[in-house]
Image: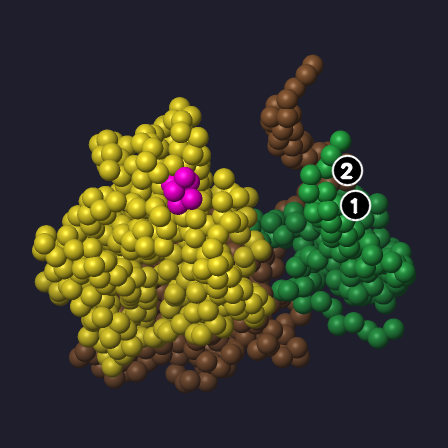
Chain colours: A brown, B yellow, C green
Amino acid sequence: MSMDRRQFLKIAGISTVLGLGGASVMRGVRGSEAEASHVMTNEKALTAKRWAMVIDVSKFRTEEEYKRLIKACHSIHNVPDFGEPKDAIKWIWTDTYEHTFPTQPNEYMGESVKEKPFVLLCNHCANPPCVRVCPTKATFKRKDGIVMMDQHRCIGCRFCMAACPFGARSFNYKDPRLALKPEDENKEYPTRTIGVVEKCTFCTERLSKGLIPACVEAAREIAKETGTEPGMYFGDLDEPGSEVRKVLSACYTIRRKPELGTEPSVFYVIGGEKNA
Amino acid sequence: MLEKALNGSRRYWTWVFFLLALVGVGFVNYLYQFKNGLGITGMSRDVSWGLYIGQFTFLVGVAASAVMLVIPYYLHDFKKFSKIVILGEFLAVAAVTMCISFIFVDLGQPMRVLNVIFHPTPNSILFWDMIVLNGYLFLNIIIGWMTLSADRKGVKPPHWVRPLIYLSIPWAFSIHTVTAFLYAGLPGRHFWLSAIMAARFLASAFAGGPALLIILALIVRRLTKFDPGKEPIQAVGKIVTYAMIANVFFLGLEFFTAFYSQIPGHMDSFKYLYTGFEGHDRLVPLMWTSSVLAVVSLILLIIPSWRKSESILATACVALFISLWIDKGFGLVIGGFIPNPFDTITEYWPTLRESLIATGVWALGFLVLTLLYKIAVTVREETSGIEIEH
Amino acid sequence: MKLYDGGKIIAGLIIFFFLVTFPFFLNIGKVNAKPEPKIDTPEIQKLAEKKCIESKAFMRAEHMKLLNDWRDSAVRNGERTYVNSKGKEFTISLQNTCMHCHSNKKKFCDECHTYMAVNPYCWNCHIAPKEKES
């Protein structure tokens, strides 16, 4: 068989492409040990159809209490504090009513609500725009409703930050380890790397061990110490008897920017003397 | 044909090395950014896209504008564009090269960029943008190269090029429509959440891109023996005029909806950009420069006797290009992030390094453009006097 | 046969040859010790049964694939328990399971990775155990 240079190059090119395909077949040929093993959910893990949170801001009294919630989260998740807003990383933080609910302004509101700090975190929307826009599925919605981040896969395009109407996402503009003292690091949890987006995960790593989110736990501790009711509830929205459903049916609650149709899973009880 | 880019005058090589130097400066600064993160830019938690994505958006428009030459020439048999259609196609190649580079330098984890292909996600507009941009790049390289090399030999291009040319027409519209969809589908960003965004993008693209082409054609005529011709330039001038009128009209529609409805979310970004908002007014001088230049260029373009003077036309095109470059390459992206989701304001301004990296990308684009134009012009000079038909 | 532009071609070939073989020249004379990953950490010494989650041969050949599967399983599917081929359960965690025993990253991980010139990005995020001076 004779062939000219052109034909040779064509065949060489095609066989290279086929060769690449062949490599994936080889990858399938694996040891028997991998086949004999399997993975599963931890038996102790807390599970739900749709995890949700209710925050009753009237239950918090002092600046100190908010700081404890934030510290509970940020210390176990190795969230760095750069001390300036430009490169800030925030999983949970506080802001005023005006900034939390900018589409529901009310200039004649009483001081008690106007000045009250509101706890903010990722809303774990049922219809999350951040998941819709992510080009790599680095952010995705789990079966239990949690909007999760896969830091391994994030390319740092920040499309999710433009898409999130709640400002819940932070980007690692700098190496987070620059702002974390090694002695303050939680050695059981990773840090993040430069150039990826991060946010609250409803403590998936704790849920898998049968623990409630760190902020909710801190709120319960505060309540126990002060002999009051906790300001944060966590539970399954799909379970009529759950803690969150009880509060939702007993109190008037609002969500941030519900008109956008993202269906946040974080609810707020604003005021009143005694609830639930 | 590539060898034609290797044989040039002293002036040509000075220009090439000047561009290479700018690319080098940009590259060194990019390496710094690569190591230290995007914290070296002016971007923040609140304004998470800046100069890079703005320039990307603007340049997608420049790339798409090649279609304004392709449609008259290939669909309407407007023969006068036969010589300059190649300039449009090669401009598109250079512009898409810049677009892809701007996306790349904007990524926080550029080494993972292939994740977009490994984990294809059709619900993400960015996934589609990657597909249409790369497709458009290859279409224009193939079409430009095949038609030019056919011209050089004095033969018709191979028959399979023609369907590709027809395909490139809707494809050009797609790149800018998809780029508009990056913005227009985001809940809670009212400045971008507008059905007319894609139409506005196309109108500004078909004004800005051809305006740049006119400037380039005039430069080519002055520096080489290749004359793109007076009539084609006038014809492109008309396209620029109509497109700019449409663009300003569409912007007016945005203003009307925002300010007649009086919905704060819709008005706030406009207020920030044009009058300043709650004491923050860093972009106001830029936006007014853009507006004034837009009006000036429109006046110069609309009056036929003025437009017919090539020096006035060139002035109008420069004014128009700068106007759109500010409006779309900067104001549009930054304005969407201000105010932020908490209704507070964090302003943005690019840092020196960020600007040098952006300049480097522009220099890279102009380098590609210079080399391609050098090849095209040399071929045209060799075949001058011969009628060509694609 | 006449070679046109012979000087340029030969010069080009020589430059090409040196470029391609540059890494070899660079490493001439350097001692390139065979990597010897160590598993003699105090944590492993304390184990009653000194066995990894799977056989040594499997771990040596497949740990990168296993870690990728673990990553997706834990982060993406929320399945954080691994049941090995013998039916024994382990918590899926590079930081808390693997590195708990293999607390000598430098000798256990880096030794081979450096030798093979592979640069996994695990440690950009995952916190490596504190190395004990030995």
> Residue A87, how many percent across, how many down?
47, 74
Foreground pick, A21 / B359: B359
State left or right for residue B156 relative to residue B106. left
Chain containing mark 1: C
Q: Which residues are magenta?
A: B377-382
Vertically, is B2 above or below B204?
above
Q: Residues within 10 Å of mark 2 (few under 14, many from 20)?
A: few
Chain containing mark 2: A
Name the outermost residue toward the top. Answer: A1
Tag 2 residue: A31
Q: Residue at x 87, y 73 (%)?
A: C134
Tag 1 residue: C61
Foreground pick, B60 / A159: B60
> Residue B296, how many percent across, how many down?
15, 64
Q: Residue at x 60, y 26 (%)?
A: A6
Query: Would you identify the image quadrant in which residue A104 lies?
Result: bottom left
Foreground pick, B213 / B124: B213
State left or right for residue C125 relative to residue B275. right
**Is residue B76 within the magenta segment?**
no
Quadrant containing the C terminus of chain B in the rendered view: top left
Label 1, label 2: how far apart the Cα atoms are: 9 Å
Vertically, is B226 above or below A223?
above
Q: Residues within 10 Å of mark 1 (few under 14, many from 20)?
A: few
Foreground pick, A101 / B239: B239
Q: Give the main secondary structure, helix, strand or loop, of the magenta stretch.
A: helix
